[in-house]
């Protein structure tokens, strides 16, 4: 625990230095004009990866993860900022949907992959599961996302988004509802030392209708999840369809419940 806290403090210090660089939205390439050939979506062509940060954060949190993906052949990497004044996960999910439609039009791809840290993963899950976003989101990777709600920091419950992340909130209960035929694949990285998850297993996806895999990370705090080398490597593998299929085949029970694996 002490080691994880020390690492998180060091990462927080570095992130505070980088935070100003991620306040604005990144520059976008122009959309495809009518008659322009669409990019191939099969074979070795990877779909765009959309990254969504956590509560009161910004896109700078994905700097190292983004660099790693770029080095390993991902060409369309988009880090989105949502407003720090966001007060409703559902509204943020609708906005994400509009961004995804624009990204698909701009890149020529029919589907995207999404990486969400903390609250960002919850926003992306709501979009995929409840707003029809599963037609656009191929794989959703979440890092320390309170899928089952978290009881940490009760004094922050004055904020509407924090209340939505509480166990038993209307949002969490809605996500527990039936989701037959959801086409998005879910990979959840959760840490046994995540200080913002209470209970600690709240960051796992546990839904009988969702195709999911939970990856346990040992000895890593909440802030370290997007930058820890083992997690970064695990995220890259999770975005490879063959890797997901192989892992699901060996770890996912026939009942349809989520499987599990671990990284250290």
Image: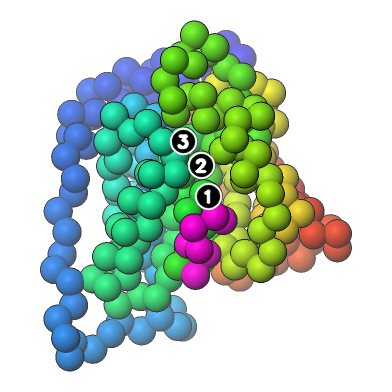
**Which numbered marker is on residue 125?**
1
Classify 168 as above or below 43: above
Query: In the image shown, does 126 or 42 lie closer to the viewer?
Result: 126
Q: Are the residues flagged by discs 3 and 2 in contact, CB closer than 8 Å? A: yes
Give, as a single range, the part of the protein colored magenta.
129-135
Residue, disc 3 = 119
* Residue pictured at 27% horizontal, 36% vertical: 83
**x, y percent for residue 203:** 62, 35
Q: Residue under circle 2?
A: 122
Q: How far across and how far down the image is residue 253, in percent?
A: 84, 58
- Taking the spot 66% from the left edge, 68% from the top edge, the residue there is 181
Q: CA distance from mark 1 to mark 2?
A: 5 Å
Tell me the SS state at disc 1.
helix
Q: Is the Cβ of the residue at disc 1 closer than 8 Å to that at disc 2?
A: yes
Q: Observer-nearest residue: 44 or 30? A: 30
Dot 2 alpha-carbon crowd within 10 angstroms: few under 14, some 14 to 19, many 20 or more: many
Residue 54 showing in the rendered view: yes
Q: Of residues 164 and 68, which is closer to you in this image?
A: 164
Camera sees residue 230? no
Q: Spatial distance from mark 1 to mark 3, Cα to Cα?
A: 10 Å
Identified at 17% across, 91% down, the residue is 35
């Amino acid at each position: 625990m002490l080691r994880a806290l020390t690492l998180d403090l060091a990462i927080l210090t570095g992130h505070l230095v980088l935070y100003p660089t991620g306040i604005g939205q990144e520059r976008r390439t122009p959309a495809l004009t009518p008659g322009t050939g669409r990019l191939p979506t099969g074979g070795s062509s990877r779909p765009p990866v959309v990254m969504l940060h956590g509560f009161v954060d910004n896109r700078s949190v994905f700097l190292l993860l983004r660099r790693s993906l770029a080095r390993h052949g991902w060409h369309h990497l988009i880090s989105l900022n949502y407003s720090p004044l966001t007060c409703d996960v559902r509204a943020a999910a609708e906005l994400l949907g509009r961004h995804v439609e624009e990204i698909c039009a701009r890149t020529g791809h029919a589907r995207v992959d999404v990486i969400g840290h903390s609250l960002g993963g919850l926003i992306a899950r709501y979009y995929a599961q409840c707003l029809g976003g599963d037609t656009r989101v191929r794989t959703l990777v979440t890092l320390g996302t309170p899928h089952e709600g978290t009881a940490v920091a009760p004094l922050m419950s004055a904020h509407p988004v924090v209340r939505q992340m509480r166990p038993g909130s209307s949002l969490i209960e809605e996500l527990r509802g039936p989701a037959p035929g959801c086409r998005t694949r879910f990979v959840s990285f959760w840490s046994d030392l995540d200080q913002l998850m209470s209970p600690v297993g709240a960051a796992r996806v546990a839904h009988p209708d969702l195709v999911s895999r939970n990856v346990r990370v040992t000895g890593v705090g909440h802030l370290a999840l997007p930058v820890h080398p083992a997690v970064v490597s695990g995220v890259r593998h999770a975005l490879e369809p063959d890797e997901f299929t192989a892992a699901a085949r060996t770890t996912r029970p026939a009942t349809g419940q989520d499987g599990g694996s671990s990284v250290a």
